[in-house]
Amino acid sequence: MTEERMYFTDRGIEELTERRGDEQVSMEWLAERLRDFVDQNPEFETPIERFATYLARLDDEDDE
């Protein structure tokens, strides 16, 4: 049995799904929003960089 943990960020993810879950966006749109976010919140530069890298390499078999 896998135990699911609830993180603080899960609430934001759930809100995103509820509010915008039916939308489709391009990677270019997402990249622009991430840049905007970091411009407004430079203290999150490292986590956003890690998240973007994670998404970019998601299908790379070499990283597994």
Image (cartoon, helix red, strand yellow):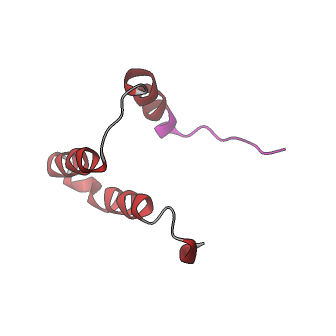
Residue 40, horizontal then vertical, whole percent: 15, 46
The residue sitting at 78% across, 45% down in the picture is 2
In the rendered view, tell whether residue 20 sits above or below residue 4. above
Q: How many marks?
A: 0
Q: Which of the 4 image quarters holds residue 29?
A: top left
Looking at the image, residue 17 sits to the left or right of residue 52; the answer is right
**Which span of residues is magenta-colored?**
1-10
Residue 48 forms part of the magenta stretch: no
Residue 20, horizontal then vertical, whole percent: 37, 26
Looking at the image, residue 59 sits to the left or right of residue 47; the answer is right
Residue 32 vs residue 60, the one in the foreground = 60
Q: Main secondary structure of the magenta part?
A: loop
Residue 17 vs residue 38, the one in the foreground = 17
Q: Residue furthest top?
A: 19
Q: Quadrant of the N terminus?
A: top right
Q: Residue furthest bottom?
A: 62
In the rendered view, tell whether residue 62 sits above or below residue 59. below
Residue 52 vs residue 8, the one in the foreground = 52
Residue 7, horizontal then vertical, whole percent: 55, 40
Q: Quadrant of the C terminus?
A: bottom right
Residue 5 forms part of the magenta stretch: yes
The residue sitting at 20% across, 54% down in the picture is 42
The residue sitting at 51% across, 70% down in the picture is 60
Looking at the image, residue 28 sits to the left or right of residue 58; the answer is left
In the rendered view, tell whether residue 30 sits above or below residue 11. below
The residue sitting at 26% across, 59% down in the picture is 45
